[in-house]
Image (cartoon, grey):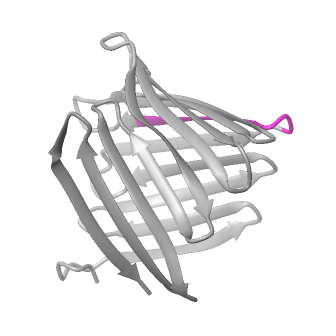
Amino acid sequence: MTASGGQVLETSFALMDGVKLSFKGNKGADLGVDYKAGGLYATGVLDVKELSKLSTSACIGLSSGVKLGGDLAYSLASGKSGVTGFNAGASYSTGPIFAALTTSNKMSAMNIGLVYTVSPELTLASSTTHSSEKMCTVAGIGGLYKAPFGTIKAKMTGDAILSASLIKDLVPKVTVTASGSASVKDFSTFKYGIGISM
């Protein structure tokens, strides 16, 4: 049952080694299949209620630390059949460096994510988007520092919004997070919050 009172049916079972079938019914009805063999993982989902859409994805991990993947959506609707979406991605990890490149909007934009682990306590990261419409959009540049008194996270966006948070474990399974954000151009936009999770 969902928060709004609706009902959801989800079930799955292993058909054979490496193959899993699943069904999810809510407003629609989706039949899925997952396939895993070695470094290959592939999925397929068919809308069996309307028979209007087929989605598939695949990802393969290579021994060199490279992962390659892609997804494709195909409309089966009468008069509108054809490919409605497709994208690809790749990532590479070695030592303290992780880099990922993904596409969006039918490969019209490219997203680049970089992570560098400077030390066990300090990690730096960036996320940018590149397209023919705009050479570079900075989604964020930031870092994480594991201080003796808690974990500090900070990020600056391309719109000059600075965000920071402090995460502290008070006792086992009880965490307090204090956060704040503001435009560096106008500190009157400062917003803050505090949260507790148990």
Q: Position of residue 40 (x, y in %)?
A: 73, 45
Residue displayed at 38% across by 12% down: 135
Task: Tell me which segment is drawn in magenta.
Answer: 63-73
Q: Position of residue 194 (x, y in %)?
A: 31, 72
Residue 162, image x, y percentages: 33, 43
Name the image quarter holding the C terminus: bottom left
The residue sitting at 85% across, 34% down in the picture is 64
Q: Nearer the viewer, residue 45 or 156?
A: 156
In the rendered image, the vertical position of residue 9 relative to residue 162, given as above or below: below
Vertical placement of residue 191 versus 10, above or below: above
The quadrant the N terminus occupies is: bottom left
Horizontal relation, residue 40 to residue 76: left or right: right
Asked if residue 68 shows in the view, the reply is: no
Pick whichever, 45 or 167, lies toward us: 167
Q: How many numbered circles are shown?
A: 0
Q: Is residue 99 magenta?
A: no
Q: Of all residues shown, which one is farthest toward the left?
A: 188
Left or right side of 189 for 91: right
Nearest the camera: 62 or 97?
97
Report the front residue among 187 and 162: 187
Outermost residue, right direction? 63
Snapshot quadrant of residue 94: top right
Q: Decide whether the magenta segment is chiefly helix, strand or loop.
A: strand
Q: Is residue 5 visible?
A: yes
Q: Is residue 129 above or below residue 155?
A: above
Q: Is residue 60 left or right of residue 126?
A: right
